[in-house]
């Protein structure tokens, strides 16, 4: 039995649709690179002015260095370890409070590593929300 070119085209389109559906499902269920599910967001998005942490990157109030590869937030009131989603433009990043203390005229400060992930240079208005 031979297949026609039309039949091959139908199968190709069907395979493409099945593949696209699989990608859509994968994107709809965010996971970390290790395969575990990301925490669900909690509450509404809030707006804040964020600035990049300045200084040498020593260990802060939470005992975590704010330099190097640490991707975290300094906040004047939130407790250490609180999970947050930060969004700037099209980028959304899962992070946590790694330092407590004054943030100058900004509502919160982000470490240089987190600023790179978000595409933040200097100061900007961002959106943030808690994780569950």
Image (cartoon, rainbow, N blue to C red):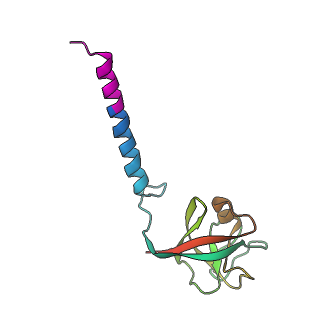
The structure residue drawn at horizontal position 41% and vertical position 61%, both measured from the top left corner, is 37
The magenta segment is: 1-13
> Quadrant of residue 19 in the image?
top left
Magenta region, main secondary structure: helix
Quadrant of image for the C terminus: bottom left
Please, which residue is most extreme toward the right here? 55
Residue 40, image x, y percentages: 42, 69
In the depicted structure, whether residue 9 falls above or below residue 58 = above
Residue 15 position, x and y percent, is 34, 33
- Using residue 85 as the reference point, say whether residue 24 is left or right of it: left
Seen in the image, is 63 located left or right of residue 121?
left
Q: Is residue 12 above or below residue 21?
A: above
Front residue of this view, candidates 1 and 61: 1
Q: Nearest the camera: 116 or 4?
A: 4
8 lies above or below 121: above
Labels in figure, total: 0
In this rendering, does residue 63 appear at all? no
Farthest top residue? 1
Could you tell me which quadrant the N terminus lies in?
top left
Magenta highlight on residue 7: yes
Residue at point 58%, 58% (across, down)? 90
Look at the image and say whether residue 84 sits in the magenta stretch.
no
- The image quarter in which residue 105 lies: bottom right
Image position, residue 116 (x, y; %)? 68, 60
Q: Is residue 26 visible?
A: yes
Choose top left, top right, bottom left or bottom right for residue 124.
bottom right
Image location (x, y in percent) of residue 48: 63, 77
**Residue that protrudes farthest toward the front in the picture:** 6
State the residue lying farthest toward the left: 1
Q: Is residue 101 left or right of residue 8?
A: right
């Amino acid at each position: 039995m031979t297949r026609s070119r039309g039949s091959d085209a139908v199968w190709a389109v069907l395979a493409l649709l099945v593949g696209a559906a699989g990608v859509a499902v994968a994107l709809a269920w965010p996971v970390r690179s290790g395969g575990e599910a990301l925490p669900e967001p909690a509450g509404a998005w809030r707006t804040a002015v964020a600035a990049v942490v300045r200084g040498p990157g020593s260990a802060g109030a939470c005992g975590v260095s704010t330099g190097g590869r640490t991707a975290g937030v300094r906040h004047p009131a939130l407790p250490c370890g609180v999970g947050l989603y930060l969004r700037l433009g099209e980028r959304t990043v899962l992070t946590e409070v790694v330092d407590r203390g004054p943030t100058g005229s900004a509502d919160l400060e982000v470490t240089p590593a987190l600023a790179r992930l978000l595409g933040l240079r200097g100061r900007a208005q961002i959106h943030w929300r808690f994780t569950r």
